[in-house]
Amino acid sequence: MNQYFVKKKTSFSNFNFYLNNFISILIICFPISIIIGTAFVEITAIFIGLYGLYILISKKLFHIDYIFILLFLIYISSNISSILSDHPYEAFSRSLFLFRYPLFFFGVFYFLSNNYNTLKYLFISILLSVIFVYLDDLLQLILSYDIFGFKKQAHRLTGPFDDELIPGIYLFRLGLISICFLSFKNKHNFYYLFFLTILLLIGVIITGEKVSSVITLFSISLLFLIRFGFKKILFVFLILLIFFSSFFVLINSSDIYKERIWSETKRTLGIFQTNRNFFDSEHGVMFLTSLHIWNDNKFYGSGLKTYRLNCKLEKYSNIKSLVVSERCSTHPHNFYFEILSELGIFGLFLYIFLILYILNKIYLNYIHNNNLISLGVFCTLIGIFFPINFTNSFFTNFNLLWIIFIIPLGLINFAEQKNE
């Protein structure tokens, strides 16, 4: 009998050993999977989510807290939106499986909180991935082709992402975090941090991604103001000078960049023009359309992923915009307008409360532990969730899983684990 229990205990230990190694590899390779493609991100997330569920059940870690309550209410609210939607199949296909995102978050957070080596190697993986994308972009900028033979577009770099125009987003979302990791041992070396962030900013600018460039500038400036206060305000102005100078050089380097960066920006924002305003642009008319959709579905919205269907309705063809015919897209290109139109005022309130709660937890981690990495994550997330922003869809698996993966990195006290 004793041999049976010893054998059973050994088998269980072996299972946990192999499981931990497997999850460790998946987490460390997650930044690389983003480069490889959406399918790898989703497969990785499925296994980490299942691991999260296994830990919750096996260790009986279910407990009531603010995050659990908010996530539960978001799940219920999203499915009520699906019930009330004019397109229940499309809405339910998304809302029914929203539970996998909290499981993915918990799997990443729990594993990294209890495995310092994986956390350390993950930051190294993030750093190497950012360096690779950065250098690949430079190669494509100079030779018009990257290391894989992907050709740059006329006005944008694609780097290793082939036809996906996201190298700037990649550098923004993981670049500041990797810099804070590099500066962890040199956290009092201001000039070291300043030099690296300037390199990052220039790297994002050369991709030709205007929005990524602006939010990178914003996040870097915020990091310096929080970290050093107004003692280094002159360096923030220097960052601004470098930003505008880089764009000036880029705009004047070719007519294509001038059209893309300057002329298109004027059209999009409705500035320096007497015959149109912001709502007469492609983004502006989508914002207006999402508001009209919300006005018809105030409390619970029209259901997840239904903007693409509702925007085609004839009643929205009378919206006051010079480009009303361009109101349709897969999403309204802003997180908050997307959530408002598809989940209503209840859904928007819950998401905003959740975002603010998480940001507060990350900021307190920085304050209480002087954790520079937490500050990098905090400033990155502020940039991602900044309301005045043109974004991709919030509810695509690829985008949402990427954001969720970043959040635990700010909640873990890296310095505390290091001293263990």
Image: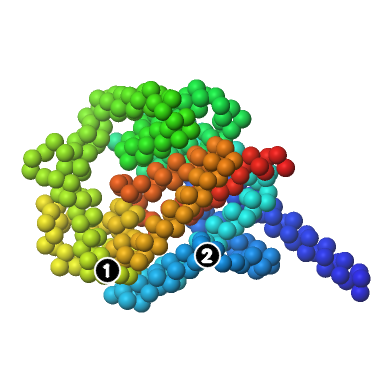
x, y percent for residue 369:
59, 41
Label 2, label 1: how far apart the Cα atoms are = 25 Å
Q: Which residue is mark 2?
A: 68
The extreme left residue here reads 275
Tag 2: amino acid: Phe
x, y percent for residue 23:
64, 54
Residue at the image point whose x is 26% and y is 28% from the top: 251
Residue at the image point whose x is 51% and y is 50% from the top: 361
Image quadrant holding the C terminus, namely: top right
In the rendered structure, find residue 298 and report the number of the disc placed on it: 1
Q: Indicate whether 109 appears above or below 298.
A: above
Please state if 8 lies on the left or on the right of 237 as rendered.
right
Please state if 322 lies on the left or on the right of 359 as rendered.
left
Q: Nearer the viewer, residue 91 or 235?
A: 235
Tag 1: amino acid: Lys
Q: Quadrant of residue 209?
A: top left
Image quadrant holding the N terminus, namely: bottom right
Q: Mark 1: which secondary structure?
A: loop
C-beta proximity under 8 Å, tags 2 and 1? no
Residue at the image point whose x is 15% and y is 57% from the top: 325
x, y percent for residue 101:
50, 61
Q: Indicate whether 121 appears above or below 302.
A: above
